[in-house]
Image: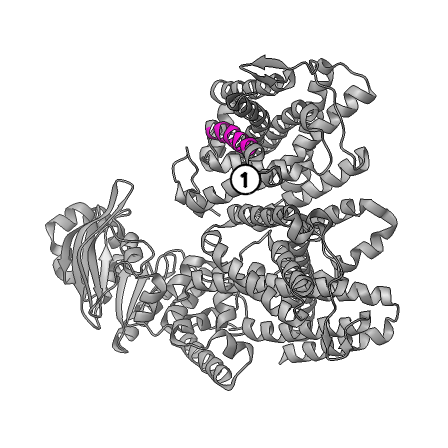
Amino acid sequence: MLEVNGLSKEFGGVIAVNDLSFRVVERQIKSIIGPNGAGKTTLFNLLTGLAPCTRGNITFLGKNICGLKPHVIAELGMSRSFQNVEIFDNMSILENVMLGRHCRTGCGVLNVALRRKRAVEEERKIREEALRQIETVGLDADPDASPASLPFGKRRLVEFARALATSPKLLLLDEPVSGLNIRETEQVAELIRRLRSSGITVMLVEHDMSVVMEISDDVLVMDYGTKIAEGKPRDVQRNEEVIARYLGQSRSNAESTKP
Amino acid sequence: MDALAITLQYVFTGVAIGSIYAMVGLGFNIIYNCTGIINFAQGEFVMLGGMFMVTLTTVWKLPVGIAFPIAVLLVVLVGIGFERIAIHPLKNPSVLVLIMITIAGSILIKGLAMFAWGKEARYLPHFSGETPINIMGATILPQTLWVLASLLTVVVGLAYFFNRTLIGKAMRACAHNPDAARLVGISVKQMVTLSFGLSSGIGAIAGVVITPIILMDYQRGAMLALKGFGAAILGGLGSAPGAVLAGLLIGILESLGAGYISSHYKDAIALIVLLGVLFVRPGGLLGSADVQRLKKF
Amino acid sequence: MKHYISLAFFIVVVMGLPMIVRNPYYVGTLVFVGIYSLITISLSLLLGYAGQISLGHAAFYGIGAYTSGLLATRCHLSPWIGLVCAAVVAGVLAYSIGRPVLKLRGHYLAMATLGFGEIVYIFLNSTVELTGGPSGFGQIPRFAVGAFSFKNDTRFYYLVWVTVIILLVLVLNVINSRIGRALRSIHGSETAANTMGVNTASYKMQVFVFSAAVSSIAGAYYAHYVTFVSPATFDANTSILLVTMVIIGGMSNVWGAILGALLLGTLPEYLRTFGDYDILIYGAIMLIIMMFAPEGLAGIAAAVKRKFEGTLVPRAAA
């Protein structure tokens, strides 16, 4: 479904992603892990078209998407969440999620300005779909309220619902459980698994090893922009280089969170 | 006069007004570096400097040497007062709010100036007479030398201030990294006030020395601000040497354009340069094309 | 649904007002409020919804007035055709400068649009043979349908305000649709909007061109109402005035845009006693609103409403 070949990104001499190649197959949960500054978020920005890649190519559903605008990539079926939750505080929760339907709907200015039947009908469908996604992520909040006053965990759910409203085939989640408490973390892990079983492929960047090891089918470890290991969670955990360069230093943390 | 002398004459005229744009551009830079704000009232400081000078010398009959610093000081007080009243109390203002507040400030200052000095253009005698000095067939007014000397003083003074004095270094630190500056005990808020004081002072100096040449009226500030902003942008926003060179360049271009093309479009030339730079190289000619910086807004 | 109740109320007030206000001078003032409202409604789409500042909209207003005025006086074209031409000219111009301009943000965008407005102003002043330069030109014919001429203030009042109502209905429909949400998302975060499939560049351009065309139509109305135009009406101060109207009313609220036009459009009448010094009061009002209520009057109203509800709800629960 997604194939990345020899992907590189330089920022004024600094190499953020270096000759990276990997594949994501359909209905897989693939996690990207690695220390801070390993280039994980940059990779997401390259995939979604927010930053142009320096070299290499990205094939999504058989189509080369390098150099395409972000909104075109979204239309192709890739959606994402952001590390620090980028939702729109100038809209209600429902409207935030309704925005996600934007690329799946097509009424033009004239249709909506004149409130043609088609536009009214479409708007009704957008609303229904948005409410459905709010339910899917399990967000209990007044959909007409502003998201500005929501606690962080719920803001994250709004963002998930918005991403899901775009009917993605591939969903990129940037640190989906950072800043969440244990219960919320479980809730999100459960949600990701449910999404996979509904046919959505998920890629996530995450630091919480217990979540990564529990839900991933495949793990890719990055450091300094390059791939240092890739494979089943179990294999990666045993990989000596990974332990030396990354897991080793966080093992104590990872173990302390387990009872 | 032969063609060369005529051109030289235009260049002299351009250098005089260009020095003013340079000083306005420097004023923009100081506030921008410290706060990220573009102060739309910058031109009003120039106008106020000229107006105070007119009153001090013609009404109060003070000699130039005494009136000059008093006029500058008064404008500095206005600048600091404006910052203290309108900008200091704000918490997390948006860019739009800051733009509108400085515009409101400029309108208010303009209104007060009209109230105090009326609508007519005010005249100020030249500081050292009006006998032109002959250079290669072209002439230069003694007042132009005053303008150039002021620009030089301002540039040298700023260089000394920012590189040699503790306060200047502190200001640079907060421009660079406000959080780190706060950690080492620099009061960023005070530095912001200081930056307004400093840049209003520079504006006032420009206003005092240029008034004998261009006359001054209450509406003059807006256009000076636009062109000074052009200088700041052309030179790369935040770069002092860039602003000075770009200011002089815009002044000369404008003067040549007025001489050889049409004086109607004199003002348009500077503005077209401004738009051109914004469209093609927002980083300016000397500044690195620092796109990230642009994205801050 | 709520919109339709407000809208119906608004239509009744607007249509009934000339029957109460009989003094032609005041009707004239309301005509100007209507002309301003056309611009502020479209500008609030650009500024409050899409979050793009323009300090050069007086230029489009002026281009509309001059295009339609010149076509009517020099080419003897019907003002109605002039009106359409004005919208097209402004739209095309906005499209051509929009590409580079709309890439800029914040202060840069403000300065670029201010500079653009100033260039148009200089142009109107300098092309003396064509436009009469600083003194402008007059004897612009009025709008007419057959023998029915919009010659008195009340007739023109209805012409302008019916246009305002039509624009208002269209804009209200748009902002409560997928396109309105797309515009607001640009204001919220351009990056997030992009990854959610919103073609931000295209929407910014569309709303910029739209607001330019509408401002130009307002300009054409001005020209055929006053029957005389000169550049001074379309200078940078007017651009700032228009943006201030939008902000004072509450920029992400179309009703606020009309309220702002009403307040600042009639303000000179209250300040008449101050003569020239109205500029002082105008500056002070602007400063105070920006400092203490940057959300504008609509924002204040919403805050009051919240507070009111906040005090009511717990009591009802108890």
Q: Nearer the viewer, residue B191 or A120?
A: A120
Report the span colored magenta: B242-256
Colour scheme of the picture = one colour
**Residue C275 location, x and y as percent?**
85, 47
Q: Residue tagged by mark 1?
A: B269
The magenta stretch spans residue B250 = yes
Judged left or right of residue B268, residue C70 is right
Which amino acid lies under the numbered mark 1 shown in the image of this protein?
Ile
Question: Most prominent secondary structure in the magenta stretch?
Answer: helix
**Residue B62 location, x and y as percent?**
78, 16
- Residue B160, relative to residue A95: is it above or below? above
Q: Nearer the viewer, residue A163 or B20?
A: B20
- Residue A39, relative to residue C162: is it above or below? above
Q: Residue at x 61, y 32 (%)?
A: B196
**Residue B202 location, x and y as percent?**
61, 26
**Residue C42 location, x and y as percent?**
60, 64
Quarter location, residue B187: top right
Q: Secondary structure at mark 1?
A: helix
Judged left or right of residue C186, residue B53 is right
Image quadrant in which the C terminus of chain A is located: bottom left
Judged left or right of residue C53, residue B237 is left
Q: Residue at x 67, y 35 (%)?
A: B44
Judged left or right of residue C46, residue A46 is left
- Residue C84, relative to residue C145: is it above or below? above
Q: Residue at x 52, y 83 (%)?
A: A116
